[in-house]
Amino acid sequence: MTAQLFLILLSIFSVATSITVEALKRLFKKIKNYDVLACITALIVGGGGTLVYYQLAGITFTANNVIYAILMGFASALCAMVGYDKVVQAIEQFRK
């Protein structure tokens, strides 16, 4: 996986994670810890999305590619956690 492909997929998965987390927040209103929800969703979207990309692009599943998918899940989770915290902080600052 090239760095360019990694960044493109990470950008796509970050947007997909944000949309999915917002939908889950509206669906399950009793959940109070949105950071954990964002982290779990990002791991699934990032890792699963990378595996789906490999399948659709005809890339064989080697040990390295599975490791890349796992790392993409963690990178996606990191982006979701940092992005979510920054957005909440900005909204709180505008309210004050």
Image: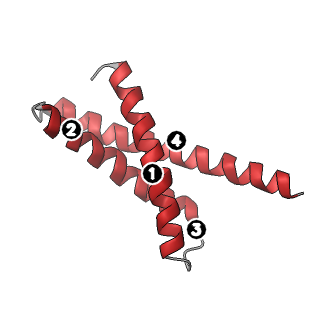
Q: What separation in Å lies between label 4 and label 2 (alpha carbons)?
A: 20 Å
Type of residue at label 4?
Answer: Cys
Q: Nearer the viewer, mark 3 or mark 1?
A: 1
Q: Residue at x 74, y 51 (%)?
A: 89
- Residue 46 at x, y = what percent? 35, 45
Q: Which residue is mark 2?
A: 66
Res. 79 mark: 4
Q: Residue at x 52, y 61 (%)?
A: 22
Chain-order first, disc 4 or disc 1: 1
Q: What separation in Å lies between label 4 and label 1 (alpha carbons)?
A: 9 Å
Callout 1: helix, strand or loop? helix
Q: Which residue is mark 1?
A: 17
Asked if the residues shown at circle 4 and circle 1 are in contact, with their CB atoms under 8 angstroms apart, the answer is yes
Type of residue at label 2?
Answer: Val
Chain-order first, disc 2 or disc 1: 1
- Residue 69 at x, y = what percent? 28, 39
**Number of numbered discs overlaid on the protein picture:** 4
Chain-order first, disc 4 or disc 2: 2
Q: Nearer the viewer, mark 4 or mark 1?
A: 1
Q: Residue at x 60, y 73 (%)?
A: 32
Chain-order first, disc 4 or disc 3: 3
Callout 3: helix, strand or loop? loop
Chain-order first, disc 3 or disc 2: 3
Q: Is residue 91 left or right of residue 11?
A: right
- Quarter of the picture holding the N terminus: top left
Q: Is residue 64 above or below residue 13?
A: above
Q: Is residue 28 above or below residue 15?
A: below
Q: Is residue 65 above or below residue 14?
A: above
Type of residue at label 3?
Answer: Asn
Type of residue at label 1?
Answer: Thr
